[in-house]
Image (cartoon, coloured by chain):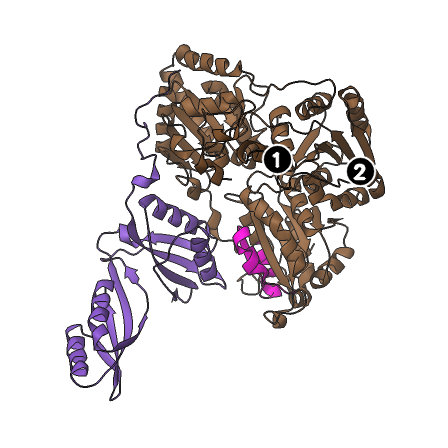
Chain colours: A brown, B purple
Amino acid sequence: MTAPTARPKAAAPETAAAAATKAGAELLLDALEEQGVEVIFGYPGGAVLPIYDALYARDTIRHVLVRHEQGAVHAAEGYARSTGKPGVVLVTSGPGATNAVTGLADALLDSIPVVCITGQVARKLIGTDAFQECDTIGITRACTKHNYLVPSAERLSSIVHEAFHVATNGRPGPVLIDIPKDVQFEEAVYVARERAAKRDCVARPPVDRAKIAQAVEMMRRARRPVLYTGGGVVNAGRIACDALRVLARDTGFPVTSTLMGLGAFPASDPKWLGMLGMHGSVEANNAMHDCDLMIAVGARFDDRVTGRLDAFSPDSRKIHIDIDPSSINKNVPVDLAIVGDAGEVMAALLAEWRARAKEDPLDDGRLALWRAQIDEWRAKRCFAYEPSRKVIKPQHAIERLYALTRGRDVYVTTEVGQHQMWAAQFFHFDEPNRWMTSGGLGTMGYGLPAAIGVQAAHPGALVIDIAGDASVQMTLQEMATAVQHRLPIKVFILNNEYLGMVRQWQELLHGGRYSHSYSASLPDFVKLAEAYGAVGLRATTPDELDAKIMEMIACDRPVLFDCVVSKEENVFPMIPSGAAHNEMLLGAVAGDKVSAEGRTLV
Amino acid sequence: MSVGTGSSQSVYPVSPGEETIREAILAVIVDNEPGVLARVVGLISARGYNIESLTVAETDVEKHRSRITIVTRGTPSKVEQIKAQLGRLVPVRRVIDVTAETDALERELALVKIVGKGEQRVEAMRLSGIFRARAVDTTHTSFVFEVTGAREKINAFIDLMRPLGLIEVARTGVLSIRRGPESD
């Protein structure tokens, strides 16, 4: 790495050594090194060859060669979510950039810090429909937090530093840097991180004391409170998760979480209500509906969470804590909005709560009725399913997977669909950053490459992708990546030979007309694993399941586990589209339960 | 636990349908860099908001700042949402709701082409005097008038000119600035 150097315009005196110029490709890698980047997920191509050439000469940054650029972005997301550090992607122009779009959109909706570097054709060729040219900046404008077309090597290192700043500050998100090939050759002086001009666009607002006092007053008056936490708490880091735990302990408030926020609050805590939303627990959704005070922290009132908006938690006052002002009052109007970092705001709430409790203690019994009500809902055991001794029930498979991996250093990723919901319901997390799933965009094919990213960050950990037979085929080629880089991920496929969630909706909403949702011509996953040089395992009966799972855990190579499960199992409970939280379906129902309006919703 | 059947305790209306639609003039101060207008316009269209008029020009050459003036319509909560979404864009420095200030100045410029002869031509010239419009181009068969003012005045001028041979209109869109010594 070069010594920090002055920008040509800066007033500081320049030494001869400091003014040394380097090619743009070298400046990029210098900047990545200074940002602490250890791993890049990428795929070479014509427009990034100078960068790959510079990478060849360095051993400071590890490169993981993916098999498709979408996989590179998901891997970077997995890396980011399991470490809290930004993930870095390097792909070429044209198809390289367009293949990365799904991953970028995924990272945007889930607020994951990713820096994606794309090559671009040389500046004089831009706009000429050159080979492998596309309008990367135009195409990715709507699926990144911000993007840059680097105009010259002189600006390159500053832009990289600003990109990391934008990606990781405020509400995190993906940032793309498009670097024309001739800029990668052009010589310029390096600009160090601390000298780079960074815009204050994502400044962290100070915590508003008056609002904290108002919030605590509302909390003290509440008799039916609930903490509704989201991915923002995980994004705000360990400090925020700890603050949430202490806040819940001191206040005694029950806690529910979105799909994205699982692990921020320990699932083993008696105040844990389980996940809320469309396939959330009865106790969580009823608590949301009947509460008199809802405290939303780092959650954005997504339609999968709220159900029917005009029936959403009708009798509650709502406090919304979020780093992004545009999340406030977007879907649900709230009574008190506190814009700020989740950890800082919760710490301030806790301090104020304790100060008030000291001077004017609250009656311990004030929440007793609410707790009794929650226990009554809990007693319904809404996740119960009909066990079977002949076929493996998917819920049973996840339960066994959870039981047999307890006490280990486990990270779980998922694809999207029924298996994802069963994983959220039956695999429990006591720590944040252990659960990586595509929540907002719902990207089938997320889990396998995300697991690769997680494993690259945590080589010794047990990384499991809980997958479905349909989803896994969307990015299956990344098995080769896992084998090549000796990343021993475990792909645990709940194989029901269906696009399970599509089939469930067709059963419940479309009269059981299973239009194109049967996965015909499935590959033999065991043979496929062997073809990739990985290990294939199959379990078809409940009796052999445990032994096969143990075999998978013991294996030090990548594994494709074909878990053959009952075919027509549905995910329950379920809030049908267009229904309210207290109108959950607990078991088999007919199609006429869903309103005509509800059917038009996704 | 019984679920309350009365109206929401929330101090804000739960149903968004109860709000009235208002017009908002937003001044968006941005870093003048490539693509910034595309970001602003793209955000507004992607989220389904309407733009009634749009003007943009660099207003601070040294700081490379531009002022984008957008006229849009929506419920108060929708307007708040547009402002918050615009505020998220990295090159956006400030979003000012000019209509939230009382009695902001509002101006627009229009070029209006009239083709006609005889009595109509005289009448067009006479009306242009009432509106303090200037003839910036004249031939034996046509005028181009330049007229400035609030939108209502320009709309009225165009309506009056229509039967007098109006064939083309170019308008700048609305510009707005706060009255008094304070700046935004």
Q: Amino acid at mark 1?
A: Arg
Residue where numbered disc 1 is placed: A503
Q: Indicate the secondary structure of the residue bearing disc 2.
A: loop
Q: Position of residue B69 (x, y in %)?
A: 35, 60
Is A446 left or right of A352, judged from the image as shown? right
Is B86 left or right of A265, judged from the image as shown? left
Against B94, is A522 above or below?
Answer: above
Query: Which residue reaches farthest bottom?
Result: B140
Q: Indicate the secondary structure of the residue bearing disc 1.
A: helix
Residue B31 visible in rendering:
yes
- Chain where mark 1 sits: A
Q: Residue at x 60, y 69 (%)?
A: A126
Q: Position of residue A529 (x, y in %)?
A: 81, 39
Determine the image quadrant of residue A403. top right
10 Å neighbourhood of mark 2: few (<14), some, or many (≥20)?
A: few
Residue where numbered disc 2 is placed: A524
Residue A144 visible in rendering:
no
Q: Position of residue A412 (x, y in %)?
A: 67, 32
> Where is the N terminus of chain B found, in terms of image quarters?
top left
Q: Residue at x 58, y 43 (%)?
A: A112
- Chain where mark 2 sits: A
Residue mark closest to the camera, 1 vs 2: 1
Asked if labels 1 and 2 share a chain, the reply is: yes
10 Å neighbourhood of mark 1: few (<14), some, or many (≥20)?
A: many
Q: Amino acid at mark 2?
A: Asp
Against A521, is A45 above or below?
Answer: below
Q: Which residues are magenta?
A: A133-161
Against A546, is B49 above or below?
Answer: below
Work out how far the residue at label 1 is from the one at label 2, CA to CA, in angstroms.
Answer: 22 Å
Q: Nearer the viewer, residue A323 or A348?
A: A323
Specify which label sits upstream in the sequence, 1 or 2. Answer: 1
